[in-house]
Amino acid sequence: MPAHFRAGNIHEDSVLKQNNLNKNNSVWRPDQEDFDSATFKVIVGDRKFTKGGQPKGTIFDSTDNGYLEIKGGTSQLNPSFQDWLDRWGVNVVKPE
């Protein structure tokens, strides 16, 4: 495993532990209702499928208190991307 991936795993494990959250290992896959929604079309775009024909999904880092995606690093979000996140109700929290 490349060092930067390992560092990300260590960071994720640390944040989960600090917040007493469980690691999620279940894949969320969109269904027809998701594909048909205007929100899905704006955020995701065209639907995509695996080679096996299943809708491409994602694994959220934790689902204990809603959907949680943990990211680490030092780069700042640029204003246009932050505006896009705000518009869709995404809450970005910088840990202390």
Image (spheres, helix red, strand yellow):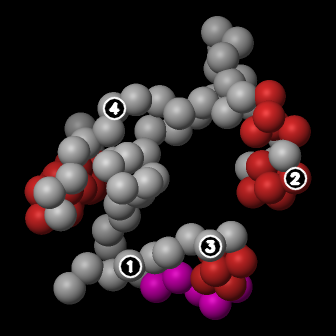
Can residue 86 be seen by looking at this rendering?
A: yes
**What range of the chain is rendered magenta?**
76-81
Q: Position of residue 55 (x, y in %)?
A: 68, 25
Is there CB contact under 8 Å for labels 4 and 3? Answer: no
Residue in the foreground of this view, choosing between 76 and 27: 27
Disc on the earlier residue, 2 or 3: 2
First of labels 4, 3 by sequence position? 4
Q: Few, some or many C-alpha atoms within 10 Å of disc 2 (few <14, some 14-19, many ≥20)?
A: few
Q: Quadrant of residue 8?
A: bottom left
Q: Are marks 1 and 3 in contact (CB under 8 Å)?
A: no
- First-in-chain label (1 vs 4): 4
Which of discs 4 and 3 lies nearer the camera? The answer is 3
Q: Is residue 59 above or below residue 72?
A: above
Q: Please, what is the three-letter code of the amino acid marked with disc 2? A: Ala
Amino acid carrying label 3: it is Gly
Residue that numbered label 4 is attached to: 25
Answer whether residue 80 is magenta in the image. yes
Which residue does the image show at 21% across and 53% down from the upper left? 21
The residue indicated by pointer 3 is 89
The residue at the far bottom in this view is 79
Q: Residue at x 32, y 38 (%)?
A: 24
Give the labeled residue for mark 1.
93
Question: Of the residues shown, which amino acid type is indicated by label 1?
Answer: Val
What is the CA distance from the residue labelled 1 to the residue labelled 4?
22 Å
Chain-order first, disc 2 or disc 1: 2
Say left or right for 32 vs 96: right
Residue 33 in the image, given as x and y percentages of width and height: 80, 34
Residue 89: x percent and y percent? Answer: 62, 73
Q: Which residue is mark 2?
A: 38
Circle 4: residue type = Asn
